[in-house]
Image (cartoon, helix red, strand yellow):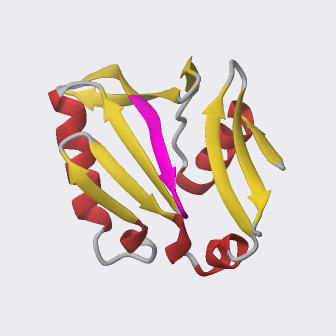
């Protein structure tokens, strides 16, 4: 079973929830690039963040990200700001540029994982594909 989400659908959802525009760009079969505009000393600049799906173990998705030292600092700052917020326990930093997303810690997704096994997350030019198989 495959769920397919276009980048436009994801961008619109992010925009509706956060009010921020985060364009997604294909970066390879398991990599997507997120572009984000930041204001630095009264100047707006675009920052790119490459996110790669390194692997899946159960309901955990192992991700790596790249974009330089500034990106590392921004990710660490963002993670420290969400501590104590609902869902913050779903995201764990492993080291400087690797994260694990614990989807099973979400009650609704946990119910999904009782019946389905997450096989793969991959990308094409316009979409994110999430592959599941029924749990034996």
Most distant residue in the front direction:
136
Taking the magenta stretch, the answer to whether it contains residue 83 is: no
Q: Picture quarter containing residue 43?
A: top left
Per the rendered image, the range of residues in magenta is 50-58
41 left or right of 87?
left
* The stretch drawn in magenta includes residue 55: yes
Q: Is the residue 125 above or below the residue 118 in the image?
A: above
Q: Quadrant of the C terminus?
A: bottom right
Quadrant of the rendered structure where residue 29 is?
A: top right
Q: Residue 37 in the image: state x and y as whole percent.
A: 39, 28
User: Which one is in front, 4 or 43?
Assistant: 4
Residue at 28% x, 71% y is 83
Specify whether 108 is left or right of 28. right
Front position in the image: 32 or 130: 130
- Residue 99 drawn above or below residue 22: below
Residue at 55% over, 64% down = 59
Q: Position of residue 110 (x, y in %)?
A: 62, 76
- Residue lying at 15% horizontally and 29% vertically, measured from the top left: 69
Which secondary structure dominates the residues rendered in magenta? strand
Give percent across and percent down for residue 71. Answer: 25, 33
Q: Measuring 44% from the left and 58% from the top, which residue is drawn there?
A: 101
Q: Is residue 19 left or right of residue 84?
A: right
């Amino acid at each position: 079973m495959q769920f397919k989400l276009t980048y436009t659908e994801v961008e619109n959802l992010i925009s509706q929830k956060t009010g921020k525009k985060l364009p997604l760009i294909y970066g390879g079969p398991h990599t997507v690039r997120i572009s984000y505009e930041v204001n630095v000393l009264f100047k707006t600049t675009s920052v790119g963040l490459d996110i790669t799906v390194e692997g899946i173990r159960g309901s955990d998705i192992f991700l790596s990200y790249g974009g330089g030292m500034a990106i590392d600092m921004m990710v660490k700052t963002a993670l420290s700001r969400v501590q104590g917020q609902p869902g913050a326990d779903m995201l764990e930093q492993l080291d400087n540029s690797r994260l694990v997303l614990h989807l099973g810690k979400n009650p609704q997704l946990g119910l999904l994982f009782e019946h389905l096994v997450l096989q793969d997350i991959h990308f094409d030019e316009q979409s994110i594909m999430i592959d599941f198989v029924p749990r034996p």
